[in-house]
């Protein structure tokens, strides 16, 4: 087991004694299954945890169903009660911030600095939905008849299955949990089997904050084993999924016969457009940060540089020089600027994309080979890699590599830049850098992506919607729309002076 703090433990090992939380009980898997959780920085075992099978997954959904349908159900608690719980969860996250950051870093490989930022972000998401949930969005409609009261009220959707990926384990699941709780839904949480630890810790905090038995349930396990038990399930009203396209479309297909609502966030292939009139140094810095942060394992990573021809050579040289200076290493080491890839399996996938880029004729400018320094030998590290002279038809330009790979395309006119930026099946995020505010606005409006940054990159706020156009998904997280996903609108029409309707003769 890892115990990575000098003279102390990285986290309380009792946290992971039993890690399925179903109907208010911590328990092991029905079939006794377990899984080793690996630290990608050195291959060590961080924890050995219970691994659910389909029987456990179905039990978790059934518990959430009972908690939603019960005589004194969660959905009839007041908004004030639910909001207070969200605020308490945020307080507890702040209390245990350092322990959670260590857990997240050991599990994902990301740097401690990034893990701390993730926790601050999820605190702000709980606080935002606590504020939003305290204000009713119900409406009274004027139907021009004093005997009629017409109202639209908002009610919880019901039982939600919330499935998260491994790149931002805590952050992605909280984007779903906070609005679902505020709306009055019950839920089953399913973190990635690769990075489940911070969600287990969060579940402990939710219990401590007063989330009642059955309202939130947690199952760990491989998607291929328990996924269908969670999603091809008539007791489920909504599935919110963040992950890959193949898995997302499979979930949409198995959920369809149940007419469960399905919200998908499926990643992106995000253009970063740089005009010659942009602040050069700031643009180089943003492009390098935008693609190599968290070693490119970010759905909104700016992996596709689209740069004006007149500055392209100088820009690629400067970006390459910066990329080579990035210090990658163990996320627990404060001098590391970025960590390893999440697993050996994922490094194999990234490596295969580098080989593909070379075979497609792109010019490898920097990176492109596993590090040879022995200090990296036990971890799944991969260096920042840049390909120049890419064309829009290359698979390396069109497919999500989810690694530290930047491709470079060039343009000469604004129209061409927009055309290239929109030439993708995805549409999650894009950025434009220019010294001309009018052009910034024009290009931002023309790009078919869910978020567009003008002279900035990667920032978001809990109050603004996040989600994709095209194959990046449907639905929206964060902002008021992120709460609306978990609500049904109901129209209640009350006649205060009932009388015969007078349609048929009496
Ligand atoms: O994701 P999966 P993977 C992209 C990225 C990556 C690719 C595949 O390009 O290389 O997806 O990654 C659960 N029913 N993104 O294979 O399989 C799984 O257990 C129900 C983009 O790791 O989509 C995990 O909890 N659930 C992305 C979650 O789905 C199933 C972030 C995501 O895993 C399931 C991560 C099933 N049948 C990867 N099969 C983003 N949008 O940010 C798996 N799961």
Image (spheres, grey):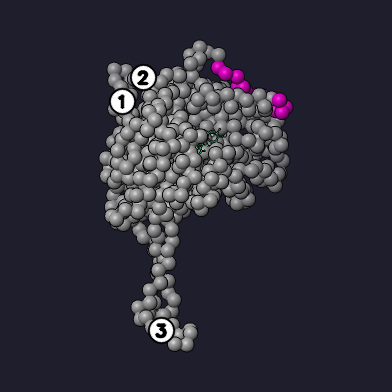
Q: Nearer the viewer, mark 1 or mark 3?
A: 3
> Image point 67% across, 33% down: which residue?
395
Q: Are marks 2 and 3 in contact (CB under 8 Å)?
A: no
Specify whether tag 3 is near ligand 1 (CB below 8 Å).
Answer: no
Q: Which residue is drawn at 41% across and 37% down?
A: 55
Q: From the viewer's perspective, is residue 379 above or below residue 152?
A: above
The residue that disc 3 covers is: 500
What is the spatial separation of the Cα atoms under label 1 and label 3, in whole angstroms? 69 Å
Is 276 one of the magenta-colored residues? no
Between 285 and 57, the one lying in front of the other is 57
What are the residue bounds of the magenta stretch?
359-371
Where does label 2 land, which residue?
1
Q: Tell me where residue 353 sits by quadrant.
A: top right
Would you name the residue on which mark 1 appears?
13
Foreground tag (2 vs 3): 3
Q: Position of residue 44 (x, y in %)?
A: 42, 19
Given contact means CB atoms under 8 Å apart, are the residues at marks 1 and 2 in contact? yes
Q: Tell me where residue 205 appears, x and y as whole percent.
A: 30, 38
Cα separation between marks 2 and 3: 75 Å
Disc tally is 3
Magenta residue check for 361: yes
**Image spot of residue 415 (x, y percent):** 70, 47
Can residue 97 be seen here? no
């Amino acid at each position: 087991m890892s115990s990575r703090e000098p003279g102390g433990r990285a986290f309380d090992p009792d946290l992971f004694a039993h890690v399925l939380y179903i109907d208010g009980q911590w328990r092991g898997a029905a079939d006794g299954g377990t899984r080793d959780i690996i630290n990608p920085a050195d291959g060590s075992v961080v924890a050995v945890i219970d691994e659910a099978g389909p029987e456990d997954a179905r039990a978790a959904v059934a518990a959430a169903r009972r908690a939603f349908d019960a005589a004194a159900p969660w959905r009839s608690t007041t908004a004030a009660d639910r909001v207070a719980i969200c605020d308490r969860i945020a307080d507890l996250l702040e209390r245990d911030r350092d322990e959670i950051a260590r857990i997240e870093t050991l599990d994902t490989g990301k740097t401690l600095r990034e893990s701390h930022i993730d926790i601050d972000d999820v605190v702000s998401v709980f606080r935002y939905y606590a504020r939003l949930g305290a204000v009713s969005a119900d409406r009274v409609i004027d139907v021009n008849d004093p005997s009629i009261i017409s109202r639209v009220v908002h009610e919880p959707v019901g039982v939600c299955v919330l499935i998260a990926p491994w790149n931002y384990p805590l952050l992605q699941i909280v984007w779903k949990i906070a609005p679902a709780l505020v709306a009055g839904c019950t839920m089953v949480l399913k973190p990635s089997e690769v990075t489940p630890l911070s969600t287990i810790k969060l579940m402990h905090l939710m219990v401590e904050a007063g989330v009642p038995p059955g309202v939130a349930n947690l199952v760990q396990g491989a998607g291929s084993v328990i996924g269908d038990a969670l999603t091809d399930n008539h007791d489920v009203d909504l599935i919110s999924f963040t992950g890959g396209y193949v898995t997302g479309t499979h979930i949409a297909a198995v959920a369809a016969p149940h007419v469960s609502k399905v919200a998908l966030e499926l990643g992106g292939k995000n253009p970063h457009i740089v005009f010659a009139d942009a602040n050069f140094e700031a643009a180089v810095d943003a492009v390098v940060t935008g693609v190599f942060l968290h070693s490119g394992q970010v759905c909104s990573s700016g992996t596709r540089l689209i740069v004006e021809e007149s500055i392209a050579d100088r820009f690629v040289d400067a970006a390459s020089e910066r990329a080579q200076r990035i210090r990658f290493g163990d996320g627990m080491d404060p001098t590391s600027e970025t960590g390893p890839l999440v697993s050996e399996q994922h490094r194999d996938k990234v490596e295969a994309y580098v080989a593909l880029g070379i075979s497609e004729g792109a010019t490898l400018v920097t990176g492109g080979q596993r590090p040879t320094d022995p200090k990296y030998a036990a971890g799944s590290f991969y260096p920042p890699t840049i390909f120049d002279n890419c064309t829009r038809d290359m698979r390396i330009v069109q497919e999500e590599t989810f690694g530290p790979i930047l491709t470079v395309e060039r343009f000469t006119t604004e129209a061409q830049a927009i055309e290239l930026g929109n030439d993708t099946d995805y549409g999650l995020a894009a950025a434009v850098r220019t010294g001309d505010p009018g052009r910034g606005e024009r290009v931002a409006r023309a790009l078919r992506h869910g978020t567009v940054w003008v002279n900035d990159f990667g920032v978001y706020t809990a109050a603004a919607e996040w989600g994709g156009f095209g194959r990046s998904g449907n639905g929206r997280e964060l902002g008021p729309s992120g709460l609306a996903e978990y609500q049904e609108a109901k129209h209640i029409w009350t006649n205060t002076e009932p009388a015969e309707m007078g349609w048929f003769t009496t």
